[in-house]
């Protein structure tokens, strides 16, 4: 039998599907409301010289003989069409080490980086950016246990690949794919988006306060946030960072007007689970 708590959550999720439908002065998509057309409309929220927890990058080796097997991101198309393809590749392998001791394996596809210098430059760029996002998106979060009876493993591996494909996260393998050639992507925003799939979204979508926040807001932050509850979380995270961790007053007002309840729900979830935002200074003011 389904417990009363789980039944309430199931009913709430069904209700969400109905409440997403409505008219809006902002944009609409399939009769659902959103404030920003794309996440990139927010603009970068992390500056180049902002603090980072990244410590050092170690080159491990270069593989040979198409040693690795992966599945590519879908083609970067507006209508989200296209399929992922499985392929074999070789890579320059690095370890990105952070001040906490956390280690992320970075694989730079040799079809994209033709020499070790370019591979190292790419690895450094993304290793530093990943060190600038809140720690709870990057590293293991045992405190999330109470929601799904499991901890968050965080980011274990980054694959930097060739092609104008969509970045995508694989929560089963705790990895995500980076496509530097992908058009229109703000690096810090999309890193936070994909990292959330490996850390917080499957926990937050079943959180009672979060579910109620979606019902109360009756608004999505972006057009893409409408596609699923997980994408709603992933799209919302950079906007929460913009509100709580930056000094961008103008954009804060617009975000808080659109999704005030989601912002508060994230505040509660982060505080309840004692999640760290290091190296960012994030407050409720």
Image: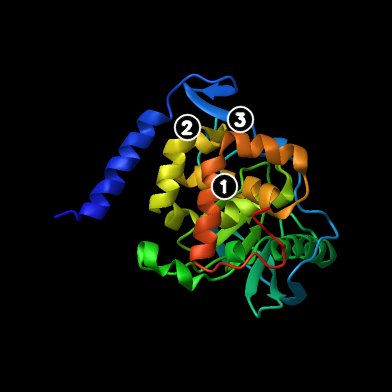
How dense is the environment of label 1, judged by Cα within 10 Å: few (below 14), some, or many (20 and up)? many
Q: Residue 35 carries which label?
A: 3
Q: Which mark is residue 263?
A: 1
Q: In this view, does 70 lie to the left or right of 189?
A: left
x 51%, y 70%: residue: 141
> Which mark sits nearer the N-terminus, 1 or 3?
3
Q: Is residue 62 left or right of residue 228?
A: right
Q: Give how far across and how far down residue 283 sits, in percent.
A: 67, 58
Query: CB under 8 Å between callouts 1 and 3?
Result: no
Image location (x, y in percent) of residue 247: 78, 49
Q: Which residue is found at the position 42% from the left and 37% from the top?
A: 215
Which residue corresponds to the image point at 78% horizontal and 63% vertical from the top-left?
119
SS category of the residue bearing label 1: helix
Q: Which residue lies furthest to the bottom in this view?
A: 101
Work out whether residue 17 or residue 107 is closer to the camera in this orientation and state it.
Answer: 17
Circle nearer the viewer, 1 or 3? 1
Mark sitting earlier along the chain (2/3) = 3
Residue located beneath label 2 in the image = 218
């Amino acid at each position: 039998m389904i417990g009363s708590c789980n039944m309430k959550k199931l009913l709430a999720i069904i209700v969400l599907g109905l409440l997403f439908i409505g008219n809006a002065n902002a944009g609409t998509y399939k009769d659902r409301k959103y404030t920003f057309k794309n996440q990139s409309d927010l603009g970068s929220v992390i500056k180049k010289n902002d603090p980072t927890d990244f410590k050092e990058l170690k080159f491990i080796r270069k593989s040979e003989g198409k040693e690795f097997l992966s599945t590519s991101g879908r083609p970067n198309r507006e209508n989200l069409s296209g399929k992922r393809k499985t392929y074999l590749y070789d890579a320059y392998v690095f370890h990105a080490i952070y001040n906490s001791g956390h280690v992320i394996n970075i694989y730079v596809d040799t079809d994209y980086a033709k020499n070790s210098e370019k591979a190292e430059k790419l690895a450094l760029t993304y290793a530093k950016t990943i060190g600038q996002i809140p720690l709870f998106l990057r590293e293991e979060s045992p405190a999330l246990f109470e929601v799904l009876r499991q901890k968050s493993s965080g980011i274990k591996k980054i694959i930097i690949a060739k092609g104008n494909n969509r970045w995508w996260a694989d929560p089963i393998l705790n990895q995500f794919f980076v496509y530097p050639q992908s058009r229109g992507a703000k690096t810090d925003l999309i890193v936070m988006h994909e990292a959330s799939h490996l850390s917080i979204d499957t926990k937050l979508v079943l959180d009672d306060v979060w579910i109620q926040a979606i019902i109360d807001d009756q608004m999505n932050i972006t057009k893409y946030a409408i596609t699923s509850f997980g994408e709603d979380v992933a799209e919302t995270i950079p906007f929460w960072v913009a509100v709580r961790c930056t000094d961008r007053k103008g954009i804060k007002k617009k975000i808080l007007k659109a999704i005030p309840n989601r912002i508060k729900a994230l505040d509660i979830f982060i505080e309840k689970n004692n999640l760290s935002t290091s190296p960012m200074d994030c407050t409720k003011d």
